[in-house]
Structure formats: structure tokens, C-alpha cells
Image (cartoon, rainbow, N blue to C red):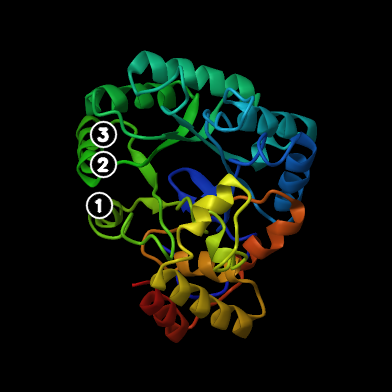
Amino acid sequence: MSDHTSTSMHSRYAVGSLSVAPFCLGGNVFGWTADETTSFAVLDAHAEAGGNFVDTADSYTAFAEGNSGGESETIIGEWMKRRGNRDDVVVATKVGALEGREGLRAANIRAACEDSLRRLRTDHIDLYYTHRDDETVPVPEIVDTLDALVREGKVREVAASNLSAPRLRESLAYAQDGGKAAYVAVQPHYNLVSRETYEGELQDAAAESGLASFPYFALASGFLTGKYRPGDEPSTKRGSLAAQYLGSERGQRVLAALAEVAEAHGVGGAGVALAWLRTRATVVAPVASARTPEQLPGLLDAAGVVLTGEEVERLEKASR
């Protein structure tokens, strides 16, 4: 959806009834590698830079030792309450992956929505994703439940993460035929070293229906920042995920191309990797997280980086 022209964090793009910045701050580190104080500092810096779009899930950050889920939503909700800025923030959260709230049965979606509203300290969720598909539940039950939440004013728009192209098309067709609330966006796993996870049938289905895309793992767990190098011994879970790309020829080609393009623009590799995503069909705002306020400027650079056609082709060639 984006072109190669200059933009900024103050730019806004229409997604259904929502208006979002060209970068989405990921909340998957809040309550995990960023405590409440640090999370508030990151959120403050994001807002001060013009950002208005924050992504979380009810399952964040249940994967951290001692957590049970909902920690990220709780931090974001407390931040919005203390800052009094709820109307200025587009909050996206998700249902279906939290232990004890798994799946997409109608009763579970409703209960999970109420839980998220309480933790976020709000009366509505701006963008509500199904976190992952639940093929044991028929499409009509999922769509009807989400539609009811929209009609009740508890959710403004609905979207899907980790959904197959056939189920996406089925969901969109059912919603259209019945005049129901339809998905306005998808959130796929997509980056320069993982193109096959979105490009092809899923991307085509999204484009055909005019859906926005908000890619997650946009920096391949930090690999595309360039901070991991062959021979490094990752000391964190995130680092271990990034390390899987270190030994591949494609990974090394991509890092080299990123370094060249980044040097030409006077920014870091992260800004270029995110800027490349914004040149892709359907992509409106990539999702990436910052553990500290100091990490944020390198991500926000993406909004101002204007890649030339030759640079885009160089990155594409390296990533094949």
C-alpha cells in the first residue's frame, strides 16, 4: 500500500475506520524484557515521535518465566490511564493463543474480549485480531461473534493473524454476503529473510480485498538490525531465534545489502529493513518492538527512509 515517497511518523493511513502511523510499536516485550517503568518510557518516546499505533495480545507475555499472560495489555492500559491519551492511541490486541483462553469458539472470544478490555482499561478495542486460526470452529461462528462485538461497540475493526489464504477468503466472502464486519487487515510473519511466509497466495488474497498488512517478526527477531554476526553466542531467547539466519547464505547476503543501503541513507539496518517492507504490496505499517527508548529511533527511521528502485531491487535480489 505504501509507495517510495517520503513520509513521517505523523503521516496517517486509513485502515477501515482507523487512522494509523506507518510504524506499529510491538508490545511483546512489555512485562518481559521491559518492566513497567521502561515500557512507559518506550511508549512515551513513541508517542512523542508521532506514533499512534500499538500492538499487543492477551497472551503477551505468558512466555516469560513467572508470567501468566495479559502483562503487556495491563502495562499499556495503565500507561493510557496515567497519560490520559486513550483517544490518541490505536490499540490492537489478539484472541485465541492464551493458555486457558485458547481457540475461537464464540464464548471464548467474548470472555477473552472482556478480559482484554479490563486489562487495557478501556471500553473498546480498536483492532481485534484472531491470533491464530482455529479450524475446529466454522467460519460463520467466528465472523458472527466478531461482528456482534463490533455492533456492540466493544471492537472497532477486526483482523486476522496467522490465517491461511483459503480461510481468509472464506471469512471475507461470508462477511460480505451477510453484511457482517469483515477483516480489514492481516498480520503475517514477513521480513527480508522470510518472504515465503506471506508472498504468494496469502498476499494475493489480502491485495484482492484491499486489506492492510502489518507484518510481525519484521526484523527477524533482531537479525536484520545487524547486531548478530557469525560466531556470536546468543545469550537470550530472542538472540537464539535470530541466530538461525546467521549460517545461511541468504542471511549473509541480506546483511551485506542492508549495510550498503543503510550507509547510503545514514541510518541503521533496522530502518532500511522496515522501509523495504513498506514498499511491499498491502504493507501499511510493520510491527517491531523496542526494549528501551534508545532502540526506538532506529526503528522510526523507517518512516523517513525513501528507497530508490535500485535499492529495492538490490534488497530483493539478496533476499531470494
Q: Secondary structure at mark 1?
A: helix
Q: Where does label 1 land, which residue?
A: 205
Q: Position of residue 245 (x, y in %)?
A: 45, 62
Q: Which residue is mark 3?
A: 175
Q: Quadrant of residue 70?
A: top right
In the rendered structure, are the residues bearing label 3 and label 2 in contact, judged by CB atoms less than 8 Å apart? Answer: no
Amino acid type at circle 2 is: Leu
Quadrant of image for the N terminus: bottom left
Element assignment for label 3: helix
Q: Are marks 2 and 1 in contact (CB under 8 Å)?
A: yes
Label 3 vs label 1, nearer the camera:
1
Which residue is located at x 74 percent, y 29 percent? 81
- Numbered mark located on residue 82 in the image: none
Tell me if mark 3 has few (under 14), some (14-19) or many (20+) residues whose alpha carbon lies within 10 angstroms of its own.
Answer: some
Residue matched to label 2? 168
| Mark 2 residue crowding within 10 angstroms, few (<14) / some (14–19) / many (20+) | many
Q: Is residue 70 above or below residue 37?
A: above
Label 2 – label 1 distance at C-alpha = 7 Å
Q: Amino acid at mark 1?
A: Ala
Q: Is residue 295 left or right of 24 when viewed as pictured?
A: right
Q: Is residue 109 visible?
A: yes
The image shows residue 227 at horizontal and vertical percentages of 62, 65
* Residue at the (73%, 41%) spot, across then down: 39
For the residues labelled 3 and 1, the Cα–Cα distance comes to 15 Å
